[in-house]
Amino acid sequence: MAGLKAGPQKALKMAIKHEEKSYQMYKKAALGVTDKDTKKVFDFLAEEEIKHMKMLEDEYDRVFRPEN
């Protein structure tokens, strides 16, 4: 659990990267299926990861870039 000893700034950066990887995984999965309903689920999950990433980026900016 490297994030626990990394400090808050590094932990947020790691979380953002994790959300990006999850987004890429779901988009790739969506491309690899032919069933419309399954594709919709993967596309939905990918969009949720984008929301998570944006939330984490906003928090990072609020805490570590307050001048923006």
Image: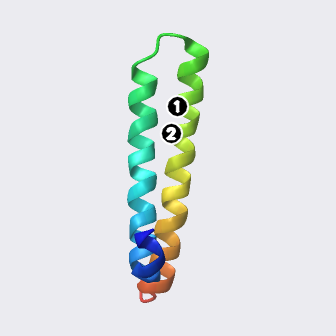
Q: Residue furthest front?
A: 1
Identify the image quadrant of residue 67.
bottom left
Q: Secondary structure at mark 2?
A: helix
67 to the left or right of 56: left
Front residue of 41/68: it is 41
Q: Find the distance from the CA under tag 1 to the CA under tag 2.
A: 5 Å
Q: Residue at x 53, y 21 (%)?
A: 39
x%, y% of residue 44?
58, 34
Name the residue that disc number 1 marks.
43
Task: Give above or below for 46 relative to 18.
Answer: above
Q: Residue at x 43, y 85 (%)?
A: 64
Neighbourhood count class around disc 2 (C-alpha, 10 Å): few under 14, some 14–19, many 20 upward: many
**CB contact under 8 Å: marks 1 and 2:** yes
Q: Secondary structure at mark 1?
A: helix
Q: Residue at x 47, y 10 (%)?
A: 34
Front residue of 2/64: it is 2
Identify the image quadrant of residue 27.
top left
x%, y% of residue 5?
43, 80
52 to the left or right of 1: right
Task: Give above or below for 42 relative to 7.
Answer: above
Location of the C terminus (image quadrant): bottom left
Looking at the rendered structure, the kind of residue marked 1 is: Asp
Name the residue that disc number 2 marks.
46
x%, y% of residue 15?
45, 63
Neighbourhood count class around disc 1 (C-alpha, 10 Å): few under 14, some 14–19, many 20 upward: some
Location of the N terminus (image quadrant): bottom left
